[in-house]
Image: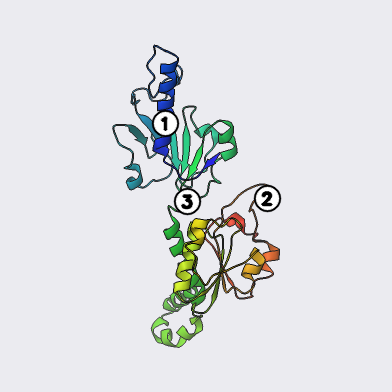
């Protein structure tokens, strides 16, 4: 049960209002509160720090204070830094690999602060009736910039040049060799080269746009291309019907697709059949998930 980006706050509030409405319709005398129906008090964790009538939010990893600031302190008890959160109504996480035993029985929703959800047991949470939210596009600009950075690093052999000069520095030869040896790492310009973008969601479409502005030719593949993303693409982009046809003439290849396990998933989708069709000097940029590429291929 993977929900696209929605308001986690609204979901929690609707849940409470629905319970309250049900209570009134059934003429129950017990007032429905945030903690109604959660069992005996002994099921609570830190009873002394428990705050009644507040939604408790448990965080894993370091979540931006800007984002956490969206939760009003008078309505939410946000637990950070490994603080005890045995009564959590919601879980926020980034890269933490969530285990079922880490999900208290009080949890009503889980939100991944990012696009991928492969670190959350979505199937099991669905069985438990816990919706899993993600935030596609939230970090799209940051990832796009890393893709462009990787492209420049790969085209200009910058890392090789740094390592070379570091070694010359140890030998005391850096000053006299810097001008002579810089020609060894000239690389190539990206202008006029072809970038294949595999996956044209928030990150992929943004990458294609900026690549076109750099004077690059762009080729794209995405069997589930949305209208929203299509409208963002540069007019000059060429769309293909397969990954193989997208990479055949590409100098750079950017992978921007989610990692999905199981049959029909994307594990090892960049395999021998794709790699054998790449140009010998093509640069593969994988800022998605390592498991997408068959490293042995």
Disc 1 to disc 2, how far (Cα)? 35 Å
Tag 2 or tag 3, which sits nearer the N-term?
A: 3
Mark 2: secondary structure: loop
Q: Is residue 167 above or below residue 143?
A: below
Q: How many marks?
A: 3
Marks 1 and 2, the one that precedes in the sequence: 1
Q: Position of residue 221 (x, y in %)?
A: 59, 63
Mark 1 vs mark 3: in front: 1
Q: CA distance from mark 3 to mark 2?
A: 22 Å
For the N terminus, give its image quadrant.
top right
Q: Position of residue 36 (x, y in %)?
A: 42, 20
Q: Residue 120 sits in which quadrant?
A: top right
> What x and y, as percent, mark residue 20?
40, 22
Q: Which residue is mark 3?
A: 136
Q: Residue at x 45, y 84 (%)?
A: 182
**On the image, numbered disc 2 is attached to which residue?**
264
The residue pinned by badge 1 equals 14
């Amino acid at each position: 049960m993977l929900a696209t980006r929605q308001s986690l706050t609204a979901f929690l509030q609707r849940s409470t209002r629905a319970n309250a409405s049900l209570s009134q319709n059934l003429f129950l005398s017990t007032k429905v509160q945030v903690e109604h129906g959660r069992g005996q008090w002994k099921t609570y964790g830190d009873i002394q720090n428990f705050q009644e009538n507040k939604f408790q939010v448990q965080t894993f990893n370091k979540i931006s204070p800007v984002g956490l600031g969206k939760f009003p302190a008078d309505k939410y008890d946000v637990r950070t830094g490994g603080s005890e959160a045995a009564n959590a109504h919601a879980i926020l996480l980034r890269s933490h690999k969530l285990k079922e035993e880490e999900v208290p029985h009080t949890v009503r929703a889980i939100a991944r602060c990012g696009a991928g959800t492969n670190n959350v047991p979505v199937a099991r949470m669905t069985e438990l009736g816990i919706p899993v939210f993600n935030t596609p596009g939230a970090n799209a600009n940051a990832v796009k910039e890393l893709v462009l950075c990787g492209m420049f690093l790969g085209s200009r052999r910058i890392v090789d040049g740094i390592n070379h000069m570091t070694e010359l520095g140890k030998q005391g030869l850096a000053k006299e060799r810097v001008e002579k040896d810089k020609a060894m790492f000239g690389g190539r310009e990206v202008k006029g080269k072809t970038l294949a973008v595999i996956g044209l969601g928030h990150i992929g479409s943004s990458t294609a746009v900026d690549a076109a502005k750099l004077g690059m030719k762009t080729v794209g593949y995405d069997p589930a291309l949305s209208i929203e993303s299509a409208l963002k693409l540069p007019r000059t982009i060429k769309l293909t019907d397969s990954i193989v046809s997208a990479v055949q003439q590409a100098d750079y290849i950017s992978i921007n697709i989610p990692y999905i396990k199981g049959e029909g998933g994307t594990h090892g989708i960049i395999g021998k059949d794709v790699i054998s069709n790449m140009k010998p000097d093509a640069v593969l940029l994988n800022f998605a998930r390592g498991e997408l590429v068959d490293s042995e291929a």
